[in-house]
Amino acid sequence: MPESFFLVSKEYPELAVDEVVTLVKMYDRFAKIKTISNLVIIQSTTPWEKIASRATFVKTAGQLLRKMSNVFFDEKNYSLLFGAKSFMCKAINLSDKPIDIPEIERSLGSMVSTFCNAKVSLEDPDVVIYLIFTEEENFFGFSTRFEPPKRPEKLTKFHHELDWKLTRAMINLAKINDEETVCDPFCGTGSTLLEAQSMGIKSVGIDFDAKMCKITQDNLKANGFHCEVFNQSYDYMTQIKDKYDGIVTDLPYGTASKVSEPPKKIMKKFISQIPKKAKFAIMCKKGLDDGIKLNLTKKYEIYRHKSLTRMILVK
């Protein structure tokens, strides 16, 4: 069975690894997964490009050819370069061992050049050859040129809105698949709706502020997207529960929020009204979930500054 590798960001290491694992399991529940530090090794029939196109915190991804004990390159492996006009060799050291990365990359590049007509390109190669060193074992792999989907742009946005990276990660952690629809009951300027649409996922939004609904619609239109946006209170989600499969949202809090109810009260009411079968990923201020019974699959802390830590609650 094919093996792929995903090197994820260390910005939110646990969340980043879980995002990849969640996507892999969503597409192939029989996939085998191994994690070494921030390296995720997947044995699955799902192409690595499909995971990489959705996973927010993947820095590098590709196909594994085999484990290795020494640096090598033989006839069986250089066949991947047939038809490639350019290549680059990249060594990644995830171990504590001292490894001369530049020398390894130069040596492997020289070796590859003797087997094929492809030329070295450090800017935009057709193929990147990877040597990955870890404490446990070392790996040999490659990736072909891969263009991630274009991200949406906003005509109007606010400084306090949900970070786009975390928005995408939350959609993935909530296991919203390609045929499903996500709902954001506090859609604001449309971050969740825009990111979902750019990932090929349908979306629906709710916001009690008519101005925000208009901004969301304008932002969607600017990117060629269309979805329903209801100018209603968040509890309207119970009336349209047949329109969506999961919820991804950032609960309002603090002075930036225009809601009249205290955040703790909103949290309690909101949780009580989520449809039982709905999957969700909810961001809220740390402490708002205290005393509320939730059957969560995972919980993450997102540190912002000394007076604010946010939580992502996933079911």
Image (spheres, helix red, strand yellow):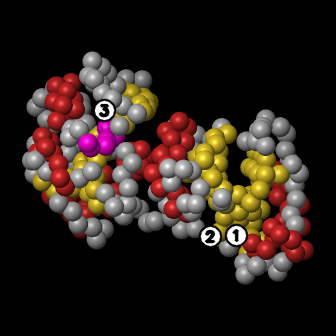
In contact (CB < 8 Å): disc 1 and disc 2:
yes
Q: Which mark is residue 8?
A: none
Asked if 58 appears above or below 107 in the picture, the reply is above
Local crowd at mark 1 within 10 Å, few (<14), some, or many (≥20)? many
Q: Amino acid at mark 2?
A: Arg
Examine the rendered structure and indicate whether residue 10 appears above or below residue 224.
Answer: above
Q: Which mark is residue 127?
A: 1
Q: Going 76% across and 42% down the picture, which residue do you hit?
A: 134
Residue 211 visible in the picture: no
Res. 145 mark: 2
Q: Residues within 10 Å of mark 2 (few under 14, many from 20)?
A: few
| Residue at 26% from the left image edge and 42% from the top image edge | 277
Q: Quadrant of residue 113?
A: bottom right
Element type where label 1 sits in the image: strand
The image position of residue 123, as x and y in percent, is 67, 68
Q: Amino acid at mark 3?
A: Cys
First in sequence, mark 1 or 2: give its number: 1
- The stretch drawn in magenta includes residue 281: yes
Residue 76 picture quarter: bottom right
Percent of width and height locating residue 78: 81, 71
Looking at the picture, how far across and down is residue 153, in whole percent? 35, 62
Q: Which residues are magenta?
A: 277-283
Q: Residue 234, can we see it?
A: yes
The first of marks 1 and 3 along the sequence is 1
Q: Main secondary structure of the magenta part?
A: strand
Q: CA distance from mark 1 to mark 2?
A: 6 Å
Residue at image location 55% in from the left, 60% down from the top: 46
Quadrant for the C terminus, please. Answer: top left
Residue 284 circle label: 3
Identify the image quadrant of the N terminus: bottom right
Q: Residue at x 86, y 71 (%)?
A: 75
Does dot 2 land on a helix, a strand or a loop? loop
